[in-house]
Structures are given as C-alpha cells and as structure tokens.
Amino acid sequence: MAYVSSLGLWDMARPHLERLVEKTGESSSMAQLDGSDIVYVARVAVPKLIALRVDVGTRFPAMITSQGKVLLAALPPEEALKVIAEPSRSGLPEKERMPDGQILQILAQVREQGWALADEELAPGVRSISVGVADGEGVVRASMNVTVHAHETSVEKLVGEYLPLLRTAARETSADWAMYQSRPVKLIQ
C-alpha cells in the first residue's frame, strides 16, 4: 500500500474505476508489473456468484493476464522476454512457458491494437480485457481492466461494448496522473 500511496494511483483511479464498474456492471482493476508478475494496485469489484478472488496486492503471472500482456507489450521486446523469464512470486503453479517467438508475436499484436485479452488463461470462466495507463511522460506504467465471467459475457461484447468505456477510463486516469505528477513540490527547509 505504501507503494500505491506514493504514486497516488488509487486516489486517481478510484472515480474512473467506479464509473466504469457502474456502466458495465463488471469488476475492474488496475495493476502494475513487478518482475514477471502483475500486482493489483486498485480494484472495484461487483458481487458475482462465481468470482476470482482478487484484492489489492494480489499477484498473478503477467503473461496469462490481459493486464500483464499490456504491461509487457509496453517494454522493448528483449526486456519483456527477460522479465518473463524471472520466476513468478504469485504462488501459482508454473505453467509451461511458450516459445519466445510466440510471446513476441502476442506482445506485438497487443502493442499494435492497444489492448489485450485473456480468455480463460488465468482461470476457467475468467475473461478480461485491458488497456494501458500512462504516466505524465506518456509511459505505460499501469494497466486497467474489465473482468467478466466467460459464460455470461462474450468476447464480442467485451471488445465492442466494454473496451471503449475502458479506454475512456484509462485515458482519464492517465490525464489525472499526468496532472498529479506535474504539481509543484514543496521543499521543506
């Protein structure tokens, strides 16, 4: 929480995540890359019968999440491969790593389209879509998602209806983050 507080991300993301959840009726989160994992730094959840247990501080291997794919795609390709090669600290069993060429192809597609999808890669029934959130210098440092139950929400609905709303929320969060970072800093003498 100290890391999140130092950046002010939760305060900036909260109203945008809440509006997104209100419009979609689905849970939304924000995450950052930490080694080969994503770490949730903000979350607004809706009660669902079947839900993935996620709290601020939860870790998942980046490459099997939509948020992780967005964050990895923001890195230079060789750096992304080095990051993915690090052992996960999520506590989940390690899945077999796909070949580097396949990883780079996926990340190139994410980079080109500006969003990522994870369709039951993390867990059965869990589908999510993510976009990047940039800091004041325009560098993607976080990602924001909408998570749905795969049997309730199609990929078409996720991309066609929720992605535009998600992009708006991420763009507004990025703008707030840039404004926050540009504020004058008082020096204590």
Image (spheres, rainbow, N blue to C red):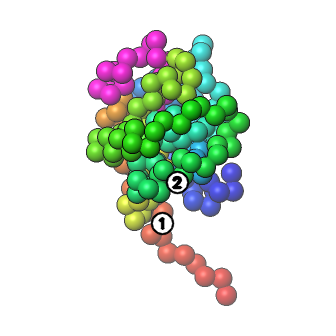
What residue is at 34 percent from the left and 33 percent from the top? 163
Question: Can you say whether 119 is above or below 44 in the image?
Answer: above
Using the numbered discs, state the Cα–Cα distance from disc 2 to disc 1 in whole angstroms. Answer: 29 Å
Q: Nearer the viewer, residue 125 or 161?
A: 125
Q: In this figure, which residue is indicated by the disc labeled 1?
A: 181
Residue 138 visible in the current orientation: yes
Outermost residue to the bottom:
189
Which residue is nearer to you in this view: 112 or 76? 76
Magenta stretch, residue numbers: 145-161
**Helix, strand or loop status at disc 2:** helix
Q: Say which amino acid is labelled 2.
A: Lys
Q: Which dot marks residue 82? A: 2
Q: Are marks 2 and 1 in contact (CB under 8 Å)?
A: no
Viewer can see residue 19? no
For the residue carrying disc 2, how many other residues have a C-alpha within 10 Å: few (<14), some (14-19), or many (20+)?
Answer: few
- Up-down: is 18 above or below 10? above
Q: Which mark is residue 155?
A: none
Query: Which of the two labelled residues, at mark 2 and mark 1, occupies the earlier sequence position?
Result: 2
Residue displayed at 28% across by 45% down: 112
Instruction: Tell me, yes or no, whether the highlighted magenta stretch contains residue 158.
Output: yes
Task: From the top left corner, tell me how far across and down residue 82 is, in percent.
Answer: 52, 54
